[in-house]
Image (spheres, rainbow, N blue to C red):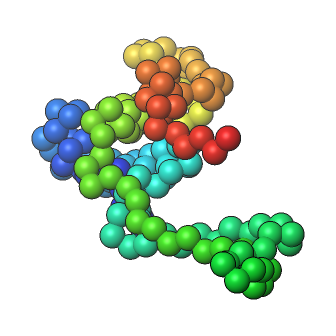
């Protein structure tokens, strides 16, 4: 299990929630939103802070390892081991995660039905916009890995 980007206590403090009635739902949202943000940004932020990340990169078969004695063998891959991430998540990223948790808490399904008091009809609202709110998207864009 990878670490979440925010803690339950941090979100509850931000949202002004003091009861424990929604802790299970909020904890699930924190985990899911953390994964979503990591996927959108193509970064893990906290996952390889203590444990090394190992990546293997392949090269073309024409690359040769050179030394002072000349060509010694063909190299078609190399391994990189590193640690990376934040010890403390940046405040703007935390704010985006908090807002995204709130966004999903309010919009928990693609279809919402609302029934007015005393009415015999049901109003159904289809949520069709798949874009994130602009203020959240801007922060995630700032923290996205760009491999170009």
Looking at the rendered structure, the number of numbered marks drawn on it comes to: 0
Toward the right, the furthest residue is 62
Q: Is any atom of residue 32 visible in this view?
A: no
Q: Which of 58 and 135 is in front in this view?
A: 58
Q: Residue 104 appears at what percent x and percent y?
A: 45, 36
Residue at left 60%, top 74%? 79
Residue at left 72%, top 76%? 65
Left or right: 1 in relation to 20: right
Q: Which of 126 and 122 is in front in this view?
A: 126
Left or right: 96 in relation to 123: left
Q: Which of 78 and 130 is in front in this view?
A: 78
Image quadrant in which the C terminus is located: top right
Residue at left 40%, top 59%? 84
Q: Residue 13 appears at what percent x and percent y?
A: 16, 38
Q: Residue 31 appears at what percent x and percent y?
A: 41, 54
Toward the front, the furthest residue is 69
Among the 4 quarters of the image, the one containing residue 139: top left
Among the 4 quarters of the image, the one containing residue 126: top right
Image quadrant in which the N terminus is located: bottom left
Q: Residue 44 appears at what percent x and percent y?
A: 46, 55
Q: Is any atom of residue 14 visible in this view?
A: yes
Above or below, 109 relative to 9: above
Left or right: 146 in relation to 48: right
């Amino acid at each position: 299990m990878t670490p979440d980007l925010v803690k339950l206590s941090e979100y509850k403090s931000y949202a002004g929630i003091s009861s424990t009635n929604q802790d299970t739902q909020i904890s699930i949202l924190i985990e899911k939103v953390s994964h979503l943000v990591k996927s959108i940004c193509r970064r893990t932020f906290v996952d390889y802070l203590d444990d090394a990340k190992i990546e293997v990169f392949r090269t073309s078969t024409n690359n040769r390892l050179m030394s002072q004695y000349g060509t010694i063998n063909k190299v078609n891959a190399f391994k990189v081991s590193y640690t990376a991430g934040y010890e403390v998540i940046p405040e703007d990223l935390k704010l985006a995660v908090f807002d995204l948790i709130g966004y999903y808490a309010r919009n928990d399904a693609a279809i919402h039905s609302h029934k007015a008091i005393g009415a015999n009809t049901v109003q159904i609202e289809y949520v069709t916009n798949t874009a994130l709110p602009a203020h959240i998207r801007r922060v995630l864009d700032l923290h996205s890995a760009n491999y170009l």
